[in-house]
Amino acid sequence: MWHWMGAPEYQAARFAVTHLLALTYLIGFVCFLRQFRGLLGERGLTPVARFVDRVPFGRAPSLFHFRCSDRWLAGAAWTGVAASLLAQVADLAPVWAWVALWALLWLLYSSIVNVGQIWYGFGWESLLLEAGFLAMFLGPTHISPPAPILWLLCWLLFRVEFGAGLIKLRGDSCWRDLTALHYHHETQPMPGPLSRAFHRLPPSLHKVEVLANHGTQLVVPFLLFAPQPVATAPAVIIVVTQLWLMLSGNFAWLNFLTITLAFAAVGGPAGPPSDPPGWFAVLVLAVTALFVVLAYWPVRNMVGRGQVMNRSFNRLHLGNTYGAFGSITRVRYEVVVLGAATPDGPWREYGFKGKPGDPARRPPQVAPYHLRLDWLLWFVAISPSYGRGWLPRFLRTLLLGERPVLDLLGHNPFPDHPPAVVRADLYRYRFSSAEERRATGHHWTRSRASDLIPPLTLDDVEDAFG
């Protein structure tokens, strides 16, 4: 009865999408486990308990409105880890068990995102939730993949790519004059080990990169909806482009998840067709109808003049709009945090796990892991307003030697006792030239630009910020 809904030639595509999605969920839960105490825990920079006290459930639906102790947060995350691993071997599960398992993953991670505040305000959080929600209705291997859900995954990939292309074309002029990558490899949030090499490519190749980006994001996505074998070609182009981006920088799991979605458009040999249970087919049709309705908001956003990027139009993070780097910074500034035993120094620098600090250190490979504090400090260097609400508390925790926050750092220069005074400076960073690299061995050159936060003692912090 429901054979018209099945797409048996996408069995391999479903396998790739669901297994890579489960891996992405696993990364997300592990990131939370390793960082939540310093960011969102009881002694963190923006505790969940304070958030749920002032924000009602209806504005941020989450399991953590009911309990939000560190033990409860950790327990939910460990449950997510276990469910992510179970999803890797759930291909032969009953349909109802498949739906329940993926629903649990979505419920747990959406509960984290909705109370994650500024630390979880990134587009790839909503992207994971939307893709993970659709995965509930792909079904296990003993039924044919539902064609409507595969179409919805392609529609999601279309919004990711085309939305990003539009925001670039409408935004910074450097995308239109093809100079964006003269700056971006150096000024991106989290450079990687090869970013300096990409930055030093000839200007003509940077222009080719921009042109290729425009083609991949503004033209190629329309071909995702072509019949096979044509639809496989744009998927391959998107995968290659995303691999290029993964080599050139660290963008958490954005590139990894975009590659995952691209597999939804890749056809293959048809497996034996098998109809789903009637109740599941009805559920698939209901979800499809829901997403048809939800499409109004991202379409209106994309065709409107005031396009925004990475916006969720509902509390469930479904039918979102996406985009990235509508504006490009031309100069790189970094927040350098220092402490001292006395106001006269000597000053010692705190090290971070991913963001540039010591000029001699090669930028590390971090992605698909996500270092949230490091990313937010990149935003603070662009505009200090991004630190409002947490940066003073961060300095206070350094003065108190609070272990949950210190665990977020790569190097604590005060292992025995906390400093008496801390400060934050802005430094101008640029990749070293070939000559500078040979002379110093450094990957970066830096010069002090200005104060960000003047020297503060614990009393100063308490008096100024309470």
Image (tube, grey):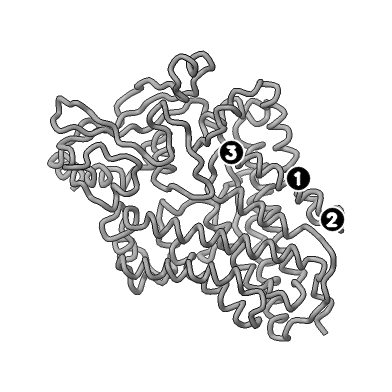
Residue 324, located in which quarter of the rendered image? top right
Q: Earlier in the sequence, mark 2 or mark 1?
A: 2
Q: Is disc 1 in contact with disc 3, using a CB cutoff of under 8 Å? A: no
Q: List x then y, in percent, for residue 188.
A: 52, 35
Question: Which residue is depicted at the point 62% across and 72% down?
Answer: 136
Closer to us: 277 or 347: 347
* Amino acid identity at mark 1: Ile
Query: Dot 2: few (<14), some (14–19), or many (≥20) neighbours within 10 Å?
Result: some
Q: Could one spot residue 280 in this view of the protein?
A: yes
Gap in angstroms between the C-alphas marked 1 and 3: 22 Å
**Quick one: SS at disc 3?**
loop
Q: Earlier in the sequence, mark 3 or mark 2?
A: 2
Q: Nearer the viewer, mark 3 or mark 2?
A: 2
Point out which mark residue 326 bears.
Answer: 3
Q: Nearer the viewer, mark 1 or mark 3?
A: 1
Please give left or right for residue 398 compared with residue 409 in the image.
left
Q: Mark 1 highlights which residue?
A: 237
Q: Nearer the viewer, mark 2 or mark 1?
A: 1
Q: Mark 2 highlights which residue?
A: 226
